[in-house]
Image (cartoon, rainbow, N blue to C red):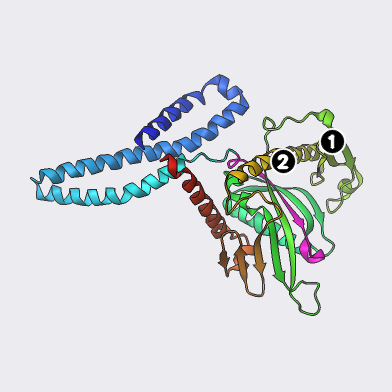
Amino acid sequence: MLDRLQIVKQRFDEISDLIIQPDVISDQKRYVQLNQEYKSLKALADKRNEYIVVLGNIDEANEIIADGSDADMTEMAKMQLEEAKERLPILEDEIKFLLIPKDAEDAKNVMVEIRAGTGGDEASIFAGDLFRMYTKYCENRGWRTSVVDINEGTSGGFKEVIFEVTGEDVYGTLKFEAGVHRVQRVPQTETQGRVHTSAATVMVLPEAEEFDVQIDMNDVRIDFFCSSGPGGQSVNTTKSAVRLTHVPTGLVAQCQDQKSQHKNKDKAMDVLRSRLYEQELAKKQAEDATKRSSQVSSGDRSAKIRTYNYSQGRVTDHRVGLTLYDLGNIMNGDIQKIVDELQLVNNMEKLKEASEVF
């Protein structure tokens, strides 16, 4: 273990020196990559220091106990030895997990797309409920959210809503939310009091930087149109909304949330870039999926991942068999228990895969 940690320490010292070099700072792509590596290696470097201290405490305590000339010192050494031996296996597990290579995308910001599925107006209302749930969760995490595009439902909610989330480790936290979310409840539009089942699809795309995806603007068709929905006269009468079509792939991105045509174009470009990046990522995930089967895989967009049952006040995540009778708080953004469980299962799978390395 110490040999591996020594290699980490050498790399950490090397990066600590590199990120203050002017030529690295001027190269944005390299600087961002090195900065992310620095953050992950710093946690390991700190654990390495603690590991060395714990091993030193064990050796020191054993020496004092073996000597046995001072009864008080021997008693203290026994307590120190017990504490160190208790901490050591926990620390080793923490180090093993940190040594597992992280997904490069985990630190990225995201574009979240929520689309109403089967269920008509009720599906649109549910899509709106999911949007509020996620925005409240992001707010509690101290992340910023910004709406990119909205297509409102006829009876409330949204047929489609796209929003950007910026913060720390956003994709690593939200990526397991991708899939089909199902709701079972009596709709507002139901007069007979019958329970209906509706669905909405959530997509979580890692936000691509300009250097992640190079887009040839000759391949992009740009259309301008009048925005729909609220926003005053200027929004509805000027062609401020922007639609971008990437001709080679047929991918489309649009934005009409900003009053400025220029800002809408920038936002739409962010969405298009993220969709192209996610397309490549999906291919890679499909290749990886053939190598390993993951319980919480974020790859299959059509997979039914979670059910929200209002009559029972129940939320069930089908991937890990987690059921919580806390629907009210969950719909108010308290999804951390679900996120933690999904990350725990994913981490355990990674540890199992990497176990032969240690």
Q: Quadrant of the C terminus?
A: top left
Quarter of the view holding residue 44? top left
| Amino acid type, label 1 | Val
- The extreme top residue here reads 23
Q: Judge whether 258 appears above or below 318 on screen.
A: above
The residue tagged 2 is 279
In the image, 1: left or right of 24?
Answer: left
As helix, strand or loop, the secondary structure at mark 1 comes to loop
The residue tagged 1 is 247
Q: Earlier in the sequence, mark 1 or mark 2?
A: 1
Q: Judge whether 94 appears above or below 331 on screen.
A: above
- The extreme right residue here reads 237
Q: How many marks?
A: 2
In the image, 101: left or right of 319?
Answer: left
- The extreme left residue here reads 69
Q: Judge whether 63 appears above or below 297 on screen.
A: above
Task: Name the residue nearer the viewer: 118 or 74.
Answer: 118
Task: Name the residue nearer the viewer: 316 or 289.
Answer: 289
Q: Classify 10 Å Cα crowding around label 1: few (below 14), some (14-19), many (20 and above).
A: few
Q: Position of residue 9 (x, y in %)?
A: 40, 31
Which of the labelled discs sits on residue 37, or is there none?
none
Confirm whether residue 167 shows in the render.
no
Q: Magenta span has 116? A: yes
Q: Magenta span has 87? A: no
Confirm whether residue 281 shows in the render.
yes
The residue stretch that appears in magenta: 105-124
Quarter of the view holding residue 214? top right
